[in-house]
Image (spheres, grey):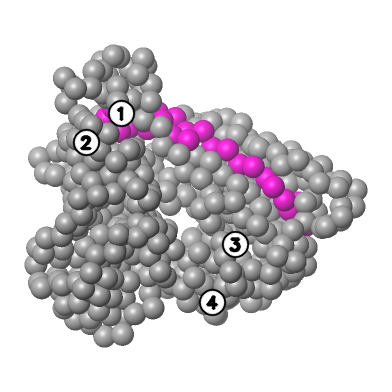
Amino acid sequence: MKTILNTLKISLVLFAVLAFTNSSKAVTITKTNGMGYTTTIESVVNNCNNTYTISLILTHNGCGGPNCKELSHLSIEAAPGTYSNISRTVLSGSFTYGSLAMGPNLGSDPFQGFKFDGTSNIGGGTAGSVRITYTITGPLQQQRVSAKAGTAGNIVTFTVADFTYVMTGNNTNCSQNNNPDADGDGCSDSEDSFPNDPARCNINVKTGTLAFEDLWPSKGDYDFNDMVVEYTFTSVTNAANKVIDIKSEFTVRAFGAGFRNGFGFQLPNAINQAHLSVTGMQLSGNIVSLGSNGLENGQSKPTFIAFDNNYSIMQHPGSGIGVNTTPGAPYVTPVTVTLNISVQPNTYTLADLGLNNFNPFIFVNQVRSHEVHLPNYAPTSLMNTNLFGTGDDASNINQGKYFVTDTNIPWAIQIPEEFDYPKEKVDIIQSHLKFKDWAESNGTLFQDWYKNLSGYRNANNIY
């Protein structure tokens, strides 16, 4: 079994950092909000009565100037009616606040929960650290934390898996006496999704939607329906938090394109690819070269190809551009491609694999080297990098800047829920009215731009 000797840091989508320590120290998870702020899950204690006590620590490193503004409020997401016993302890500096707002609605924050409002003496050149402790009733839940400074939300997301990892790593789940372990795997029945299977303990689920423009490096019609894919990653881990297998489901909802495009994803860490295998790919040609374990050949990081031709996945209905993008054309039932990934036993945690930061992409019109990725996600080893800096693209490899225009407009987007995509040939800016502000602010404004909120969309332009 792999022993973690030193702190391992892995970048997430929002430049998050997960800090893992060895067994002689407390296990924590730290993520970077931005503007000098970080948030840490310090502890998670299962109280064995359907409640959990959680301690988070917000820290500011003391940076100043326009990029490190003073904190105006600190908000923590929680489902209405599930949070109580909120307290704060100043660990360093002189953090103060005006009021504790118990929500559930939090004004400008894109989530419900509670917040410390009117904060001061932290940020904007003043270092400090404050612990927030609270109780959650019911199961653990995904929680976002906003360190609002100026107009920036500075939001990080902690998943259920994050809280579970800290709790399990610090042995603060329920005692064996209060929670029997029927299968003897070290995972108490109250936490065990497989109470009669000693090889399995927890299920972790990650979902969302991806949408792509396939005319990169040119902007094209910018309707973000050239490929619309919903994804679900269902990962199973054992009592030691090691991944056993991953079921990856990709549901193709639409493609408003004449191109024959493929779709795949890459894991962010250069782990031993011989420790992985995958089945379930739908390949119709000779565009992709796979190894005996099903992963793509010639890659420095594990790369999985779900399909190589969207037109072989969903049949064109005979009218309209592509499938499910032209009003009046026959609707085609979405199709799901399922990849089953096996992982060498007792080798990798979810953080080791980096699944939360997976790197999805399409490759355009049967040209494997013509990839389109999410903004600032690096291409795979098979990408034709000569395409960078051509057309409307403003990528700069030396700066780690990829697949954006000079005003940060992307060619691919990822959102955590179902996406109401535009009609064929309708610019996304004309359907989702906050998209442009979100993109050009590098994601600091209108982080909920895709929501069906007042003033957020023109419904007539959405399919």
Q: Earlier in the sequence, mark 2 or mark 3?
A: 2
Q: Which of marks 3 and 1 is nearer the N terminus?
A: 1
Of 317 and 174, nearer the camera is 174
- The residue pinned by badge 1 equals 191
Of 121 and 283, nearer the camera is 121
- The residue pinned by badge 3 equals 452
Callout 3 environment at 10 Å: few (<14), some (14 to 19), or many (20+)? few
Looking at the picture, which amino acid does disc 2 mark? Asn
Q: Earlier in the sequence, mark 2 or mark 1?
A: 2
Looking at the picture, which amino acid does disc 4 mark? Asp
The Cα–Cα distance between marks 4 and 3, rounded to whole angstroms, is 16 Å
Q: What stretch is highlighted in magenta?
A: 234-260
- The residue pinned by badge 2 equals 46
Q: Position of residue 81 (x, y in %)?
A: 34, 48
Q: Position of residue 204 (x, y in %)?
A: 41, 37
The Cα–Cα distance between marks 4 and 2, rounded to whole angstroms, is 41 Å
Q: Are marks 2 and 1 in contact (CB under 8 Å)?
A: yes
